[in-house]
Amino acid sequence: MAEPQIVRKSAFASLRGVTPGRVSQWIAEGKIHGPAIVGEGRSAMIDASVAVAQLRNSLDVNQRFGLNGVGTRLDLPPAASPAAAPIVDTVEAQIKAEKLRQAQLTTSRLEEEDRSRRGLYIDAAASRAEIARVAAELLKAFEGALPDFAAALAGKFQIPSRDALHLMRAEFRRFRERHAEAHGRAAAAEPETIAAADPEPNGIQ
């Protein structure tokens, strides 16, 4: 026969094989608390299934099997409930969760260090500076070659070399300004950070 879900303190004590005073002690110590207590004051009752779940987490073996030789019965099946008993957030559970979090952080850090050693990461600021330096050198070299281009053009079409150079420099300046503006707009539209794809199948080299 299923035991009652909501019972008086005395009935809960009888079901668990302890005295009513022990139940009051558990409540005072916070071993039975919150959703396990229905009502207030002397008329408060006990949600048996929730209280049993809390006691299983808060009582150690010595407390459950005390010096008086009376075992606290916490293995009785709780009454059927439409919802499962809430998970009790004990100190032990918090310690285990923190250890798991620390282990995950350590694993993540070691993976990042391994990727860095294998050259999968680069210094983004240094990369941008190097690209800008190379681009500037290419533009400077091309612009420095304009007089040679103008001389070749002037000799081919029998026009003054000075006029050819003036025209080529003007066109080159307009070309550079137009493309600088387009690249500036494209750079402004890029997000500050991007996710790098793993070049290795399944992350294994």
Image: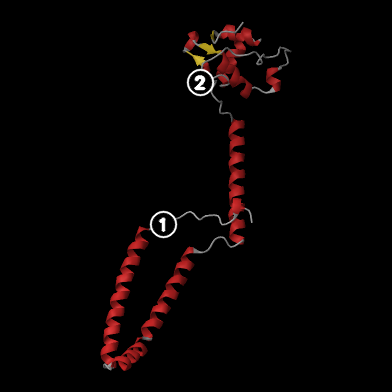
Q: Look at label 2 and name its amino acid.
A: Gly
* Mark before the other along the chain sequence, 2 or 1: 2
Q: Are marks 2 and 1 in contact (CB under 8 Å)?
A: no
Residue placed under numbered mark 1 in the picture: 192
Farthest-out residue, front = 157
Foreground residue, 172 or 69? 172
Q: Position of residue 93 (x, y in %)?
A: 60, 31
Residue that appears at 48% across and 54% down: 195
Location of residue 17 (image quadrant): top right
Residue that appears at 41% across and 83% down: 141
Q: Identify the coloring.
A: secondary structure
Residue that appears at 63% across and 8% down: 15
Tag of residue 34: 2
Picture quarter with the C terminus: bottom right
Residue that appears at 71% across and 12% down: 70
Image height of 49 relative to 112, above or below: above
Disc 2 to disc 1, C-alpha distance: 47 Å
Foreground residue, 143 or 159? 159
Q: Look at label 1 and name its amino acid.
A: Glu
